[in-house]
Amino acid sequence: MDCCDHCHVPDPHRGNTGYRRVLWAVLAINAAMFLVEIGAGVAAGSASLQADALDFFGDAANYAISLLVVGMVLRYRALAALGKGCTMGLFGLWIIGTAVWHALHGTLPNAYTMGAIGFAALAANAISFGLLWAYRDGDANMRSAWICTRNDVLGNLAVLLAAAGVFGTGTGWPDVIVAAIMASLALQGSWLVVQQSLRELRQGSLAPAE
Ligand SMILES: [Zn+2]
């Protein structure tokens, strides 16, 4: 749900080799978990798993932007953010469509796969947080990293809740409802990113995202 837009990876460590290695590692973890959750979501017929994957996509894009684009001129940063926002928006619409399709067809997602992948996603977020922990600096930075991880974990817990709900009710509704909520939040987030980057492109003036 692109919760991590407000938590920019700190700049003070740019040029620090260890920090860049950590950024590459969390980028790899988040990109891998995006693919795993999308794949498992399709395989298990779970829209909420696919919705949770959106956050991994957004976070991976943020780390990629920190590694590759942050040092560049504002125009490129704004274009990168615009690309991220549009991609997430399209994914969000696709997941809403998937949720509607599942609801109409009354499909039953595989609760075991949802649970297993939900736990893997929790672990991936915990590991990313642990890796970045050493490079937190200042109260504000620590706070935003904490808020970011907390939101990620809430998304993972929502998937686990949906898995329990599917298991308990024997229907796909908990999956559909959780997916619809998460995808709506992601759409909202991507719309803000798109608006912000368009504004920056128009102004061409320095207007940092926060
Ligand atoms: Zn996140």
Image: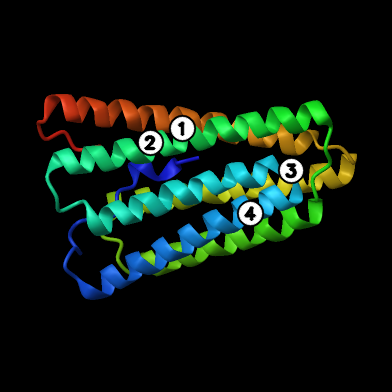
Residue at 37% x, 50% y is 61
Q: Which of marks 3 and 4 is nearer the N terminus?
A: 4
**C-alpha gap between disc 3 and disc 1:** 23 Å
**What residue does disc 4 label?**
39
* Mark 3 within 8 Å of ligand 1, using the beta carbon: no
Q: The residue under label 3 is which amino acid type?
A: Ala
Tell me: residue 124, above or below residue 169: below
Q: Which of marks 3 and 1 is nearer the N terminus?
A: 1
Which percent across, then down, holds residue 81? 30, 40
Looking at the rendered structure, the secondary structure element under dot 2 is helix
**What residue does disc 1 label?**
89
Q: The residue under label 1 is which amino acid type?
A: Gly
**C-alpha gap between disc 3 and disc 4:** 18 Å
Residue at 40% x, 27% y is 191
Looking at the rendered structure, the secondary structure element under dot 3 is helix
Which percent across, then down, holds residue 49? 65, 47
Q: The residue under label 2 is which amino acid type?
A: Gly
State the image quarter where residue 80 is shown: top left
Mark closer to the observer (3, 1): 1
